[in-house]
Image (cartoon, grey):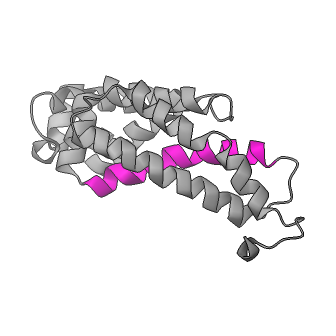
């Protein structure tokens, strides 16, 4: 029952965002639209931003299911773009009302989980320290989130496939190459190169 109520609150928030900006929506507005009392809202979420974050994570989890491998990362990124497009009024409103930082945090979590899966897969038979794998995943995470935020800022006009194709050219074999440079079982050190 808890998930059903949370989804109903999410639907009410998204419905209200079609009519007014996030900073003009109150918990009372959401509760009334949803047909519940304010206390029920607080049983599930501490505030509107908590609901926004939960909504983003839910959408992201659905978008990335099973897409965390080297062969499927492009599909995973495409599904992130599609999830953002499906929720365009919601994302643009959050981006403009809350702050770029809030959207960044959401996208960082989302893309890091995808990328660390790819890096872990490519490093399967290599002796690479966890912090080095994390660094590689972070590097690509920041690149992707920067591209995505520019796309959102420009009202999502560019075709997502074009962005993914460009990113693919940059990433092709570069993750493996970076992992090889970070291998602890190599005779050369990273600083020798």
Q: Please name the residue shown 60% across and 53% down the image.
A: 137
Q: Please name the residue shown 68% across and 29% down the image.
A: 71
Mainly helix, strand or loop, the magenta region? helix
Q: Please name the residue shown 26% across and 47% down the image.
A: 48
Residue 77: percent from left, percent from top? 50, 33
Say whether residue 75 is left or right of residue 146.
Answer: right
Residue 163: percent from left, percent from top? 41, 33
Query: The C terminus is located in which quarter?
Result: bottom right
| Furthest residue in direction bottom, as rendered | 191
Q: Which residues are magenta?
A: 100-123
Task: Tell me if residue 104 comes above or below residue 15 in the rendering.
Answer: below
Say whether residue 70 is left or right of residue 33.
Answer: right
Q: Residue 169: which quarter of the image?
A: top right
Nearest the camera: 122 or 188? 188
Q: Please name the residue shown 29% across and 26% down the image.
A: 11
85 magenta-colored: no
Nearest the camera: 137 or 61? 137
Residue 107: percent from left, percent from top? 43, 46
Task: Tell me if residue 188 comes above or below residue 108 in the rendering.
Answer: below
Say whether residue 129 is left or right of residue 162.
Answer: right
114 magenta-colored: yes
Say whether residue 98 is left or right of residue 144.
Answer: left
């Amino acid at each position: 029952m808890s998930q059903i109520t949370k989804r109903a609150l999410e639907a009410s928030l998204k419905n209200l965002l079609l009519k007014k900006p996030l900073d003009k929506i109150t918990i009372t507005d959401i509760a009334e639209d949803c047909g519940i009392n304010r206390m029920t809202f607080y049983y599930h979420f501490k505030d509107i931003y908590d609901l926004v974050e939960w909504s983003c994570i839910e959408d992201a989890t659905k978008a990335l299911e099973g897409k965390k491998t080297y062969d499927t990362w492009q599909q995973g990124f495409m599904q992130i773009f599609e999830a953002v497009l499906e929720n365009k009024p919601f994302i643009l409103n959050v981006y403009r009302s809350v702050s770029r930082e809030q959207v960044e945090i959401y996208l960082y979590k989302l893309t890091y989980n995808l990328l660390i899966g790819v890096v872990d897969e490519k490093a399967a038979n290599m002796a690479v320290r966890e912090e080095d794998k994390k660094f590689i995943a972070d590097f690509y995470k920041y690149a992707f989130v920067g591209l995505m935020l520019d796309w959102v800022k420009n009202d999502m006009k560019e075709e997502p496939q074009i962005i993914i194709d460009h990113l693919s050219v940059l990433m092709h074999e570069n993750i493996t190459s970076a992992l090889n440079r970070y291998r602890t079982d190599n005779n050369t050190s990273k600083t020798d190169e």
